[in-house]
Amino acid sequence: MATQRRFRFIYGFTAWMLLAVFGLTLLNSVTLELVFVLSLIGFLITVELTAPFTVTPQWRRRLKWIIVFGLLVFAGIVIRRILAILPPGVF
């Protein structure tokens, strides 16, 4: 049962990533930042959609560190984008 849930998580995230990269390729806008942001969104959605109701397995508890790291990198991307938009004399 636990292995099926792991595979459901892996299959869901893999499908999300393939669709995201395929969509970005069709739009001709593949950048590392967009791929990372879309993969983080897909990861968070997959984590929530495959979450068990009662008991949290050990492998799911370790996902929080991946989420924290992803959100920190996302914050860095957002800050870098904001600084690029601002005029040079503001900051």
Image: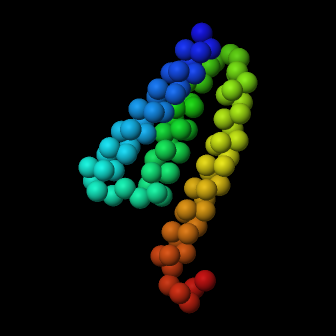
Q: Residue furthest left?
A: 26
Question: Height in image: 66 above or below 9?
Answer: below
Question: Height in image: 4 above or below 65?
Answer: above
Which quarter of the rendered picture does the C terminus lie within?
A: bottom right
Q: Quadrant of residue 2?
A: top right
Question: Height in image: 82 above or below 52?
Answer: below
Instruction: Give the image location of residue 4, x and y in percent.
Output: 55, 14
- Write the residue at 53% across / 38% down: 43
Choose between 16 and 53: the one closer to the eye: 16
Colour logic: rainbow
Q: Is residue 77 left or right of residue 16?
A: right
Instruction: Give the image location of residue 31, x and y in percent.
Output: 41, 58
Question: Height in image: 86 above or below 37?
Answer: below
Q: Is residue 91 left or right of residue 35?
A: right
Which quarter of the rendered picture does the N terminus lie within?
A: top right
Instruction: Give the image location of residue 57, x and y in percent.
Output: 70, 21
- Write the residue at 57% across / 56% down: 74
Q: Quadrant of residue 53?
A: top right
Q: Residue furthest top?
A: 1
Q: Is residue 60 left or right of residue 23?
A: right
- Write the residue at 53% across / 21% down: 7
Instruction: Give the image location of residue 55, x and y in percent.
Output: 71, 17
Q: Quadrant of residue 5?
A: top right
Image mark count: 0
Choose between 28 and 46: the one closer to the eye: 28
- Write the residue at 51% across / 79% down: 86
